[in-house]
Every structure is written in structure tokens, then in C-alpha cells.
Amino acid sequence: MPRIALISDTHNLLRPEALAFLAGADHIVHGGDIGGPDILAQLAAIAPVSVVRGNNDHEPWAADIPHSLTVTLGGVAIRAVHDIADLHLGPADAHVRVVVSGHSHKPSMAERDGVWFVNPGSAGPRRFSLPISVAELLIDGDRITPRLVTLAVAPAAVRR
């Protein structure tokens, strides 16, 4: 059963807790706002990576990263886009079973009309009071089981 790890909004911070979660994944999908090429290299050392460019990925290193992509993993078509507002599915995309997004830093998952919409939240710097989170897809034939995971991260050092 393939395990697809989902991560987004690292903003150049790949926490040890996120690395531990990603370990053993068959594939990683990054929903954008990567932060830098070092993040992609660290992810690629764990598993093959499919990635989309976020609104903050505008440096030359990100020039060849697509704004959206569709990848088939474990027989399941997965569309990735950073901002869900930029999602454009048409009749040719009827085979898409999962949409992965980021941008809001708010983890969420919902199934609508047979398509899972998963935002793994942010695994990078904390934004407001939102959790630090990731997600995964377990694929067993036609069955897709998504799961959101809040990472237990050490609190930031107290500044004096």
C-alpha cells in the first residue's frame, strides 16, 4: 500500500519532526512555498518528490517548478496547486481523485463528489495560532485514506 506524504509551506524550514514523519514515504508531494532548493534536496533524499511553486517561490531556483501538476501515484491521479483559488479542473481532469494545496497554512481535508481536497497545513514557521502539520495518503487499490497529522514541535526559545 503506497504511502504518499504531503507537505506544504515549509518556507525554508524543514523541521526534524517533519523529517521523521516523511521517513518511509513512497513519494512526497509538496504544495508550494518551499523556500529554497535545499529543502527540495532534503526531501529528495527521502523519496521521489513532486512539487509546485508557491507565491513566495520566485527566485531563479524555482523558475522551472510548475504552478500546478498532476501526478499518478499508486494508480491515483493527484493534482497539486499552491493556492486552491488557482485550481482549474475541467472535463479532462475527471480522473483526478485528490487535490493537494497549501497557501492558507490551515490544515484541512474534505471529500466532495469523489475527490479528496487535502491541505496539509504548514510544516514551516508557525503562522498565527495554526498548528504545524503535514498529511499523508494511504492508497489501497481504489481506496484512498487521507490523514492530517499535527506535529509536536518544541516551543520556540524564550527571548529576553
Image: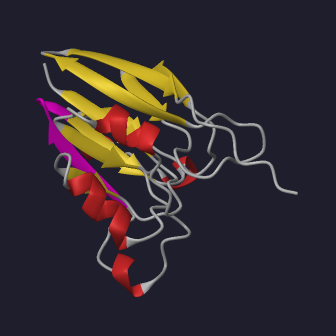
Residue at 45% of width from left, 37% of height from top?
Answer: 17
Residue at 47% of width from left, 47% of height from top?
Answer: 15
Residue 106: percent from the left, percent from the top? 63, 37
Left or right of 127 on screen, residue 111 = left
**Would you place residue 147 above or below residue 21 in this image?**
above
Left or right of 81 on screen, residue 125 = right
Query: Is residue 100 among the parts visible in the rendering?
Result: no
The foreground one among 147 and 87 is 147
Residue at 46% of width from left, 83% of height from top?
Answer: 59
Is residue 113 on the magenta stretch? Answer: no
The foreground one among 156 and 27 is 156
**Quadrant location of the N terminus?**
top left
**What segment carries the magenta color?**
68-76
Q: How is the image coloured?
A: secondary structure
**Would you place residue 38 above or below residue 82 in this image?**
below
Residue 96: percent from the left, percent from the top? 28, 35
**Would you place residue 125 above or below residue 135 in this image?**
below
Residue at 35% of width from left, 28% of height from top?
Answer: 136
The foreground one among 138 and 114 is 138
The foreground one among 156 and 76 is 156
Query: Is residue 107 among the parts visible in the rendering?
Result: yes
Left or right of 90 on screen, residue 76 = left
Residue 67: percent from the left, percent from the top? 39, 64
**Would you place residue 155 above or below residue 32 in this image?**
above
The secondary structure that dominates the magenta segment is strand
